[in-house]
Image (cartoon, helix red, strand yellow):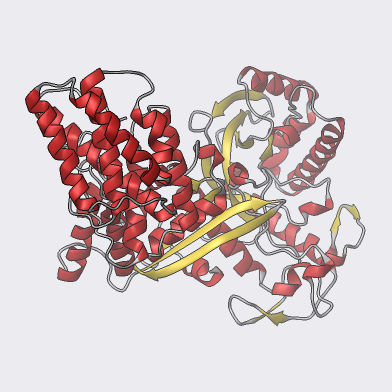
């Protein structure tokens, strides 16, 4: 996985360099050459902009340290939330002192920073700036950058050179102006083989943190992907990151590339992020992984046909898609300061196209109005089909379904049990049918293997009695509605659960009661319903199962849905209104 990250290349990704990183800058502060406050500019309407080449301080775990030039508002301006914890305020004040000391040292060597140091040292100027940020409703954790008399210090080579020299000296000596305590992680170790390059290197003691996972369990300050902060994680007397030796250059490179992918090529999936990329660049319109989350068009079978067109174009050479391409998909989240890798998949681009096309094909099902095929479901709609609300979706469940889609695997039976439970609840509460849920039920049988006679539309010749029993209940429900109108809690609300579990004990009683409904209809319509019931009975062949297991109950639900949709389509053709129970 890390090797593939190192190989990743994007045209807009700046080269990695130790001591520098890319940050999301929310505010730009303009000061004059005299060190006076001029203005505050929000970056990208306060959403922030990605800025590369920001100095990154090492050994931040030591506490009391701050980054050079680019820092948060709470560190630079001492902006805090109302009722902020006193310990956090004290810690930020220590970091503020460190930030100011760094500027003092830099200004003594580079005159271009004298103005900035004068500004930071002026309490009145800081109070004025703090007041402005309060009016702007800025967050203390927002990052800021500077313009000094119209000049960007991050583009000043003299300043950058000073930072690089200072950093190298500090790493080698373990000092900042005053002697610090020696830490185990800074003890000198012999050169080791780099896990990523195979070269002899001096390994880093602590890996840089990866930001961008705060909305999936990560920390706002970042999380470590490769870390050994417990004795139980260490071997052979090695400490911290020496247990997976990597050079500073390689470590910085994989961290920067993963941060870039998280920012630009990731999607949230429950409490996790799916990060994906390709060996060779693929345009968004040719990206099948994007199809899963957002089908190209909300029209009948749009994503399916699009995936097939791409695959055919690849085979014939008609579409400008790189040959011999590969895909990589990484599912991650944050957990107590660590990056949790939930899944890792890779494979041929052509195989990916095939599996995405199969995914949409398996989920094809008639729409509830019965007139066409339901729109291709978004991946998160499929996930939502098995829970009450997406916020209740466990990350492992979403990760498993993601692997099912990309690897062409069978759908786990527990997911179908959950989908069936939600189907029953929606019926009882008289909610509209969920297309993604019905597609999931159909896809379950297709991916299970064997011939289960799955069809997009109603299959009147389906050999399973459970499917036909579901059809029968749908006809009886329509018969009651035709005879009595809307009666509130009808056949479905009162008997669906019993009929789908023990049809042998329930359907016979409902058939007997249907005679009363038939007597209320006009002759032609009554005969039509009698023919419908007789046709289904002929498929059941006088054998109504006493009980149904989980898979049979699922077939019952599919038969019920497709029969309702079939009737709805016919009613629509006759300009009649119809509502699925």
Tell me if residue 205 comes above or below residue 498 in the rendering.
below
Q: Position of residue 574 (x, y in %)?
A: 9, 26
Kindly give the residue lying farthest to the left in the view shown: 524
Q: Position of residue 301 (x, y in %)?
A: 21, 48
Occupied quadrant, residue 81 = top right
Tell me if residue 252 comes above or below residue 195 in the rendering.
above
Q: Is residue 228 left or right of residue 309?
A: right
Tell me if residue 487 comes above or below residue 76 in the rendering.
above
Tell me if residue 88 comes above or below residue 420 in the rendering.
above
**Number of numbered labels in the structure image:** 0
Q: Is residue 329 left or right of residue 178?
A: left
Occupied quadrant, residue 51 = top right
Residue 375 at least partly seen: no
**Which quarter of the image is occupied by the C terminus?**
top left
Looking at the picture, tell me which residue is in the foreground, 37 or 417.
Answer: 417
Residue 581 at least partly seen: yes
Looking at the picture, tell me which residue is in the foreground, 208 or 417.
Answer: 417
Q: Is residue 508 left or right of residue 12?
A: left
Q: Identify the residue at image location x=81%, y=64%.
A: 230
Q: Is residue 328 left or right of residue 391?
A: left
Looking at the picture, tell me which residue is in the foreground, 40 or 143.
Answer: 143
Q: Position of residue 240 (x, y in %)?
A: 78, 67
Q: Position of residue 318 (x, y in %)?
A: 15, 64
Looking at the picture, tell me which residue is in the foreground, 241 or 482.
Answer: 482
Q: Identify the residue at image location x=31%, y=60%.
A: 446
Occupied quadrant, residue 232 = bottom right
């Amino acid at each position: 996985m890390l090797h593939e990250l190192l190989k990743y290349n994007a045209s807009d990704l700046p080269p990695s360099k130790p001591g520098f990183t890319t940050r999301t800058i929310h505010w730009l502060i303009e000061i004059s050459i005299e060190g006076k406050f001029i203005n505050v500019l929000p970056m990208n309407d306060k959403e922030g902009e990605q800025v590369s080449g920001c100095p990154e301080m090492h050994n931040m775990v030591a506490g009391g340290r701050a980054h050079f030039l680019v820092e948060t508002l709470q560190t630079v301006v001492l902006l805090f939330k109302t009722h902020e914890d006193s310990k956090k305020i004290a810690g930020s004040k220590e970091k503020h002192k460190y930030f100011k000391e760094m500027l003092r040292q830099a200004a003594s060597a580079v005159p271009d920073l004298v103005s900035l140091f004068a500004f930071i040292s002026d309490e009145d100027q800081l109070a004025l700036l703090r007041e402005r940020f309060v009016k702007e409703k800025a967050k203390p954790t927002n990052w800021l950058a500077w313009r000094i008399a119209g000049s960007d210090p991050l583009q000043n080579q003299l300043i950058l050179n000073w930072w690089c020299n200072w950093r190298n000296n500090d790493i080698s000596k373990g000092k900042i102006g005053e002697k610090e305590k020696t830490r185990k992680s800074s003890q000198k170790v012999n050169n080791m083989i780099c896990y990523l390059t195979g070269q002899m290197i001096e390994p880093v003691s602590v890996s840089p943190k990866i930001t961008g996972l705060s909305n999936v369990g990560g920390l706002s300050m970042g999380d470590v992907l490769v870390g050994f902060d417990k004795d139980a994680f260490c071997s052979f007397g090695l400490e911290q990151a020496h247990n997976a030796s990597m050079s500073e250059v390689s470590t910085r490179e994989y961290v920067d590339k993963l941060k870039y992918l998280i920012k630009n090529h990731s999607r949230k999936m429950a409490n996790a992020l799916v990060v994906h990329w390709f060996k060779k660049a693929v345009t968004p319109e040719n990206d099948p992984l994007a199809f899963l989350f957002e089908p190209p068009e909300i029209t009948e079978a749009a994503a399916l046909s699009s995936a097939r067109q791409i695959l055919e174009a690849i085979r014939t050479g008609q579409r400008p898609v790189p040959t011999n391409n590969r895909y990589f998909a990484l599912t991650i989240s944050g957990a107590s300061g660590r990056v949790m890798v939930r899944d890792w998949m890779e494979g041929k681009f052509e195989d990916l196209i095939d599996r995405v096309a199969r995914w949409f094909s398996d989920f094809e099902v008639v729409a509830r109005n019965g007139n066409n095929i339901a729109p291709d479901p978004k991946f998160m709609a499929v996930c939502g089909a098995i829970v009450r609300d997406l916020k209740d979706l466990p990350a492992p469940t979403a990760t498993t379904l993601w692997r099912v889609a990309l690897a062409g695997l069978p759908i786990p039976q527990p997911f179908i049990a959950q989908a069936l439970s939600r189907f029953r609840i929606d019926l009882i509460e008289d909610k509209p049918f969920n297309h993604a849920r019905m597609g999931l039920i159909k896809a379950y049988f297709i991916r299970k293997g064997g011939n289960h006679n799955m069809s997009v539309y109603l299959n009147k010749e389906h050999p399973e009695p459970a499917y036909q029993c579901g059809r029968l209940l749908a006809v009886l429900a329509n018969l009651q509605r035709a005879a009595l109108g809307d009666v509130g809690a009808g056949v479905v609300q009162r008997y669906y659960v019993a009929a789908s579990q023990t049809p042998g004990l329930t359907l016979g009683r409902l058939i007997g009661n249907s005679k009363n409904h038939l007597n209320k209809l006009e002759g032609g319509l009554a005969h039509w319903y009698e023919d419908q019931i007789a046709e289904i009975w002929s498929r059941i062949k006088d054998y109504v199962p006493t009980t149904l297991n989980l898979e049979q109950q699922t077939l019952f639900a599919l038969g019920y849905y497709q029969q309702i949709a079939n009737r709805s389509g016919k009613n629509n053709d006759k300009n009649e209104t119809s509502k699925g129970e």
